[in-house]
Amino acid sequence: MSDHHVVIVGGGFGGLCAARAFRAPTTRVTVVDRRNHHLFQPLLYQVATGGLSPANIATPLRSLLKGRAATRVRLGEVTGVDLEHRRVLLVDGELEYDSLIVAAGAGQSYFGHPEWAELAPGLKSLDDATRIRRNVLLAFERAELESDPERTRSLLTFAVVGAGPTGVELAGALAEISRRTLAGEFRHIDPAAATILLIEGAERVLPSFPEVLSRKAARDLEQLGVTVRTGWIVEHMEPTSIVIRGSDGERQTVACDNVLWAAGVEASPLGKALTEGSSAELDRIGRVVVEPDCSLAGRPEVFVVGDLANYGHGLERPLPGLAAVAMQQGRYVARLIEGRLQNKISPPGFKYLDKGNMATIGRKKAVAEISGLRFSGLLAWLTWLFVHLMYLAEFQNRVLVLVQWGWNYVTRNRSARLITDSKKDRIPAQGGDP
Amino acid sequence: MSDHHVVIVGGGFGGLCAARAFRAPTTRVTVVDRRNHHLFQPLLYQVATGGLSPANIATPLRSLLKGRAATRVRLGEVTGVDLEHRRVLLVDGELEYDSLIVAAGAGQSYFGHPEWAELAPGLKSLDDATRIRRNVLLAFERAELESDPERTRSLLTFAVVGAGPTGVELAGALAEISRRTLAGEFRHIDPAAATILLIEGAERVLPSFPEVLSRKAARDLEQLGVTVRTGWIVEHMEPTSIVIRGSDGERQTVACDNVLWAAGVEASPLGKALTEGSSAELDRIGRVVVEPDCSLAGRPEVFVVGDLANYGHGLERPLPGLAAVAMQQGRYVARLIEGRLQNKISPPGFKYLDKGNMATIGRKKAVAEISGLRFSGLLAWLTWLFVHLMYLAEFQNRVLVLVQWGWNYVTRNRSARLITDSKKDRIPAQGGDP
């Protein structure tokens, strides 16, 4: 076994791809994550809306890295990095490294309102997803028992903040749940009367997509029953209402019991620790500005990849926080490290191969831009389906997801509509909040 | 719509079958449950051991009762029954009834040691199952990080208390996990070195089965790597050890971090409320002794079915707490009520049609007794599989479970091995307990 020890922080797309890209079977690799599973985040909204089960989109890291005898998985929470002495600090120990790949990702940003986290859950982990699933389903259950029509309306109002791909997907799925899935299941309320607001500060939905696709997506969303409010931001939040402000300064108060947050991301706090011991800088959202080879300025043995990295070399603006970017960076860095170990010439700087961008809106509705081609509707939806199943090829459960999706498609069902969590699965006394 | 209102407390096997057995589309039925889903309890151990996802074995009650316009689902927690005024009391309201079916089931009994509930989770709900799944997986993760060999051994010791079908199934699945599923996934520990103890107070495993099958099951368990300790009871429990006592009075202390409870059941506390307002009696484990037509003595409009009922008419001993009993009683009572409404002659007392008894031990290993025929091994296992899939026909997701099982069988995989729950998914500092 090699003496060189590579530590990878984070088992997301970047970290996992890096770990799997080491070819020499003797390279000692340790993957540290506080969770025991790799999560296929792009499908998290399907767990939040009862279409898939957590196990459909998450796989134990150990089983993904099982065949690699020199690779080990360490469950643990990283608290910092001692760049000087080449040590990763954990809550319950530390790890010495020769090369370090930090792929710690990003969390939700509430734009200076951390107190909103309690009122408006974001969608970053399986626990977030099952929490949102519980809240959404309980809102319909509470509305069924409510006698005050104003409270009923508020319980049946869902505000999704942020109209990037996640927000669009969430809003579309909520519209399908209320219009289709729950049809005929209630006796006092009509679930289809639910209001689904999609609130976006920019002037159009999917601002990172070409305008024509944004228009198409907005039309599809409205058709599904989503009320699209572009040019509005959330200014204030209470448990049963939000205040939104339009770009013209107009303010509105919306009675609304359910706010879902898909607006901003903020890089892992580990970024700060890395810049404190190096000459690298942080950008506005906490990402580490990296060198052309994804390394940390002045620390050639330390690399940052994925959502935590700000990579802008030769580009108009930094690479976006996409799975594809993280995966390519992870693989690139693993090969660079192996090249060094074999005394090969280092490869040129990282180059992102843009495979396109897509977002799904609902059954048979999606938008996609691939190699400059823009398309929407059924074809885009099928492409989305195909690409996601191909991505899932990294996992073992692609077949199962395919079957589950086929089943959902044929039956229009969402069988994972479960309210779990012993402490919260009871309807509280009326007026109470869980 | 009929003026007659039937309230059913509990959406388990008894309650759900009763609700679905009402034939007249106009009979007003309300099903109350504190959970939004019907749970296929016999497969709960597969969720606890990562073989199936919660959604595979649970289905929203609303979707199961969707087609019945006069049937409604009320999420809520029942606190008591006012038999005099025919009202079901809820935390957040009450329901008037003309006929009442109580199918509130049973919970875990710790034989006078309620404090053990924290140390030794039972297996009654989806939350119990995901809690056990988390604990079991975290035990292996902690052992991987542990340097003290005694602590490692304790972390890798799993004691299953009670060798009824659930205990046997749990112990068998734990053996398969440690010997097969986790093989090759750890670097410091050998998961196959884990000790799985199956502790049973009676002199044989599966005491409710014929002796020959108990012997066969014990042999199969030992072959899988389970240490079977019959004639032993748990006397004392600490977070990292248990004291067991043999039938000859011998005491042993076993270092053991993981205790799973499958020993006793105790009927719902609602039983007590029912006997206080009627002349019915409670049995030793809190079940209501019912009349030959499953009604409450002196209250012909109130019925008790399933695990909460003690039905002993014309039998040597009361009917066991099996899904089949609850289902048949639920259907019987629904027909009896409908017969009364149509002024038909009441049917004779309830008769249980014994469809047999079976328990699975592991892959291709099971025991079964059907119509006096006793068999084991592959045939029993296939029968178990077939019968459970047929039972699941009551649900919509039979196909998906079949596919998941086929997949697990071919790949020997347990893809639902996820440690979730944000507050507990981190490895605590060593020595700490979550």
Image: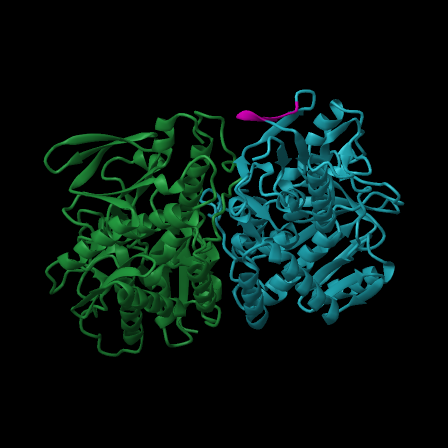
Chain colours: A green, B cyan
Q: Position of residue B258 (x, y in %)?
A: 63, 49
Q: Foreground: A340 or B261? A: B261
Give the position of the N terminus of chain B as an image quadrant. Answer: top right
Q: Is residue B338 magenta?
A: no
Q: Residue at x 42, y 36 (%)?
A: A189
Query: Exactly how many numbered labels are in the figure?
Result: 0
B255 relative to A139 in the view: left or right: right
Q: Is residue B121 left or right of residue A347?
A: right
Locate residue A70: give its quadrant: bottom left
Q: Position of residue B199 (x, y in %)?
A: 76, 51
The answer to if B93 sits in the magenta stretch is yes
Magenta segment, principal secondary structure? strand
Rendered location of residue A390, percent (x, y):
36, 70
Q: Residue at x 75, y 59 (%)?
A: B358
Question: What residue is shown at x 79% (from left), y 49% (from top)?
Answer: B352
In the image, farthest residue toward the top: B84
Q: Quadrant of residue B191?
A: bottom right
The foreground one among B422 and B211 is B211
Residue B107 in view: no
Q: Residue at x 29, y 59 (%)?
A: A365
Q: Is residue A350 above or below residue A188?
A: below
Q: Note whether A289 is above or below B190 in the view shown.
A: above
- How far from the left and from the top, in percent, is residue B325? 74, 48
> In the shown orientation, is residue B63 left or right of residue A232?
right
In the image, the segment drawn in magenta is B86-95
B213 versus B309 height, above or below: below
Q: Is residue B387 left or right of residue A341?
A: right
Whether residue B4 is visible here, answered yes or no, is: yes
Choose between B415 and A333: the one closer to the eye: B415
